[in-house]
Amino acid sequence: MPEALSAPLVVEFPFTRSLGPVQSAFLTGLRERTVLGVRTAGGKILVPPVEYDPVTAEEIRELTEVAATGTVTTWAWNPAPRRGQPLDAPFAWVLVRLDGADTALLHVLAAPGPEAVRTGMRVRIRWAAERTGAITDIACFEPYDGEETGQQPAPHDGRFANPVTGIVTPTRLDYRYTPGRAQSAYLDALSRRRIVGERCPSCRKVYVPPRGACPTCGVATAEQVEVGARGTVTTFCIVNIKAKNLDIEVPYVYAHIALDGADLALHARIGGIPYDQVRMGLRVEPVWTEDGRHPDHYRPTGEPDADYDAYKELL
């Protein structure tokens, strides 16, 4: 049995979204060192603001300016900041109810240690030196000795020059992936240009790639089965958006391929044929690079297309 594999893996998706009038005013306000909330029909001021009342579900637009000082309602100490977090040194995650607001804002507090943080402590915003219209325009909160001024929240029209209308959220997950026994054996076989799956002892279906258990019967699988390298395109999509760090020109085709002898379709890129000529039933085979541990893509074999009845159960 091959040694179980393990490797670092990064899943990254920079999500771009447009902003409505409330969120646009909130983020643009941060750029201008102004904190805005929104007033509900019941009179509560929500910070950060939302576009719909969480109680009545009605749209709310009445913007209100609140103070840049507030009170910590709860907190948790972070002794080892990770890449991309707001501060490089240890800090506290805090929920801060800004003066004039009825809800708390999640952010970070710069403090020398956990002994310097407590629920109920007074804090104020430390603004970033360069502000772009993002939550990071609040660099962090810092301890503040002043008391509440008693100043009432002031209505605000939400109008600013050059408002922020969209943001990009850089979502990323770094972790170490260990595929386990079944997939380690599958990857080891791929490195030797063999494709293996596992057969369910109950329904007798062969799964490629194997997962170590049958998704239909819920029983463990152990019997290894080598399947044919060739297969049939069952379904596919045409990709028109170029992915970051992926050296493949668009448009290209990504397809589900039912390998000969397998009862589960795997997905792979189709090459060697114009994207608009790929079709269901197309017979394909793997193309390996010189040092590749897995097929780079699949290309047409030149065989006649498979009959629909031969792969309809694998759609």
Image (cartoon, helix red, strand yellow):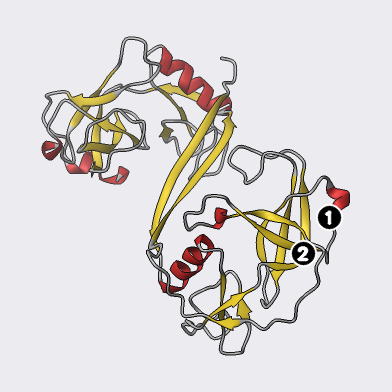
Q: Which residue is mark 2?
A: 72
For the residues labelled 1 and 2, the Cα–Cα distance comes to 9 Å
Nearest to N terminus: mark 1 or mark 2: 2
Camera-nearest residue between 19 and 245 = 19
Image-quadrant location for residue 265: top left
Which residue is the extreme one toward the bottom?
42
- Asked if residue 276 shows in the view, the reply is yes
**Residue drawn at the location 44% of the way across and 35% of the way down:** 204
Q: Amino acid at mark 2?
A: Val
Q: Are marks 1 and 2 in contact (CB under 8 Å)?
A: yes
Residue picked out by circle 1: 117
Counting other residues with Cα less than 10 Å from the Cα at mark 2, is it few (<14), some (14-19), or many (20 or more)? many
Residue at 68% over, 69% down: 104
Amino acid on which the number 1 mark rests in the picture: Val
How many marks on residues? 2
Judge from the rendering whether residue 115 lies leftward or rightward of residue 53; answer left or right: right
Rendered residue at 32%/9% (across/down): 290
Q: Residue at x 66, y 44 (%)?
A: 87
Q: Is disc 2 placed on a helix, strand or loop?
A: strand
Q: Residue 91 appears at what percent x and percent y?
A: 74, 46
Q: Element under label 1?
A: loop
Q: Examine the image and state in which quarter residue 71 appears.
A: bottom right
